[in-house]
Image: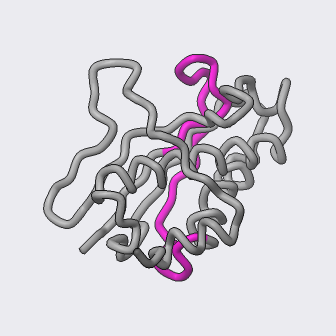
Amino acid sequence: MDISRIDARLRDLGITLPTPTAPVANYVPFVVSGNLLFVSGQLPMGPSGLVKGKLGAELDAAAGNAAARLCAINLIAQARAALDDDLDRVRRVVKLVAFVCCTDGFVDQPKVANGASDLFVEVFGDAGRHARSAVGTNALPLGAAVEVEAIFEFE
């Protein structure tokens, strides 16, 4: 079987998608409505565990950017599961919403969210360009530093 275009791109980027995580509360990991895929917020869970902390206190914008990138990897893993293991079905990343756990004076939420945004463009090219919101908050589930949700259009 030939490797898909997006799987080849992930391989070239050195990214191995994790097994999607199960929800930690009363919700589903994704919902399909028409040709839109809504993926629930993903936390920055990576090989070293969950990235915890508050931007502007324990973490700086660069650490937050790396955490948002982990969220994006987990979003792509959920999208793959939702689309029957075929990421080539993604026509466009429509929108991201990034929640950044931060101190009151922290104003670099966009720099943090770029960790996710940049990865989507690296993986999906122009189809990865999206609308976005980057929001600061005082706390996130499980003490996570960042949470990112996404909407994809697919065929």
Residue 153 in percent (x, y) is at 31, 68
Q: Which residues are magenta?
A: 123-148
- Left or right of 87: which side holds 44? right
Find residue 103 and report its horizontal and vertical position in percent.
75, 27
The one nearer the camera, 137 or 37, is 37
Q: Is residue 129 visible?
A: no
Residue 30 quadrant: top left
Most distant residue in the left direction? 34
Image position of 67 (left or right of 84):
right
Tell me what residue is drawn at x 75 percent, y 47 percent: 66
Is residue 38 placed above or below 24 in the rendered structure?
below
Q: Does the segment drawn in magenta span residue 66?
A: no
Residue that extends furthest to the front in the rendered view of this protein: 1
Magenta stretch contains residue 133: yes
Residue drawn at point x = 28 percent, y = 57 percent: 84
Quick check: 59 left or right of 86? right
**Front residue (pair 44, 19):** 19
Task: Tell me how many marks there are.
Answer: 0
Q: Nearer the viewer, residue 121 or 14?
A: 14
On the image, the x and y values in percent for residue 6 come to: 50, 72
Please name the residue shown 49% across and 38% down the image: 42
Q: Could one spot residue 93 in this view of the protein?
A: yes
